[in-house]
Amino acid sequence: MSKSKIVIGNWKMNKSFDEAEDLITTIEESLADYQLETEVVLCPPAIYAELVTDHASLEDSRFYAGLQNVSEYDNGAYTGEVSASMLASMDVDFCIVGHSERRKYFGETDTVVLKKMRQLLDQQLIPVMCCGEILEDRKSGRHQDVVKAQIEATLYELTPEQMERTMVAYEPVWAIGTGETATPAQAQEMLAFIRSLIEKKFGTEVAYNTYILYGGSCNAANALSIFSQPDVDGGLIGGASLKADEFIKIIEAAETAGKDN
Ligand code: PEP
């Protein structure tokens, strides 16, 4: 049985309130005509969460609400932080964790990533755990070792039940926001490798059911060839999710790839 694809838009720290509202409305109107099997998740900056949850909660909504980050702590005196229970109380369903920008600019380690995943899982949210190697690691052939270490330090610490509620996004750091995309073969090779790691620890069924996405300069032109790879369950989209027409084309590619698989 084939799985439907998932396309997640990561807006990062972009858009004014009005622009965010425009983008959501345009995406919603554009998707209204589709009978989609592809699941769509929009991850705006946290301050705009309600804009997305308001739309996502509509009965005929075509997308889910997600965010880009969450606190590793429960609640209390952590100025500037947003807790998983707050996300849950606003009906946010998904949250990205361990994005390479958070690892690089905010010192997020695998230990912190794991804490954040547990916070989200405790609140019944779906973590989208990002992993990926830097260019040096790819050039020296260490890319699988790096990703394996990230997976072992995070996913391997989950219970099987928690793993079943977790998604993974492979995002080679050298491809994020650079315009340089992994080839479909590189994406497939790494996603199959990640799936094999999950299988080793959690078994074949969990590994098959786990959504593993590709992210890194994915756009309307390259999405279909990447999404058509057997282990690619969809995409985490940064820059191209900021333009409604481009994002819709990526969703169309996911839909086509999902039907052809
Ligand atoms: C991302 O930030 O998750 C991402 C994939 O960015 P981009 O698509 O812009 O490379």
Image (spheres, rainbow, N blue to C red):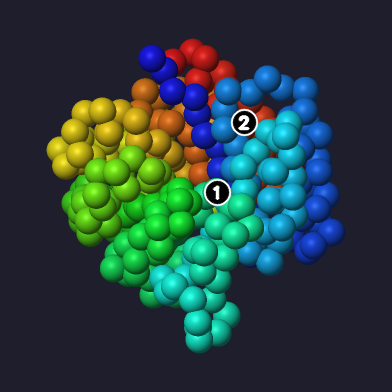
Element carrying mark 2: helix
Mark 2–mark 1 Cα distance, whole angstroms, equals: 19 Å
Depth check, front residue: 81 or 110: 81
Q: Position of residue 38 (x, y in %)?
A: 57, 28
- Residue 141 in sight from this viewpoint: yes
- Type of amino acid at the residue the image marks with label 1: Asp
Describe residue 251's horizontal placement relative to residue 236 as left or right: right
* Rendered residue at 57%/33% (across/down): 39
* Rendered residue at 69%/43% (across/down): 56
* Rendered residue at 57%/65% (across/down): 86
Q: Tell me which numbered mark, 2 or 1, is placed earlier along the sequence.
A: 1
Describe residue 244's horizontal placement relative to residue 194 as left or right: right
Q: Position of residue 231 (x, y in %)?
A: 35, 28
Depth check, front residue: 5 or 248: 5
Where residue 161 sits, quadrant-wise, is: top left
Does the beta carbon at disc 1 come under 8 Å from ligand 1? no
* Rendered residue at 59%/53% (across/down): 92
Q: Position of residue 146 (x, y in %)?
A: 23, 55
Tell me the quarter of the image containing the N terminus: top left
Describe residue 185's horizontal placement relative to residue 159 as left or right: right
Say above or below: 226 vs 72: above
- Type of amino acid at the residue the image marks with label 2: Ile
Residue labelled with disc 2: 251
* Res 93 label: 1
Depth check, front residue: 123 or 246: 123
Q: Position of residue 46 (x, y in %)?
A: 63, 64
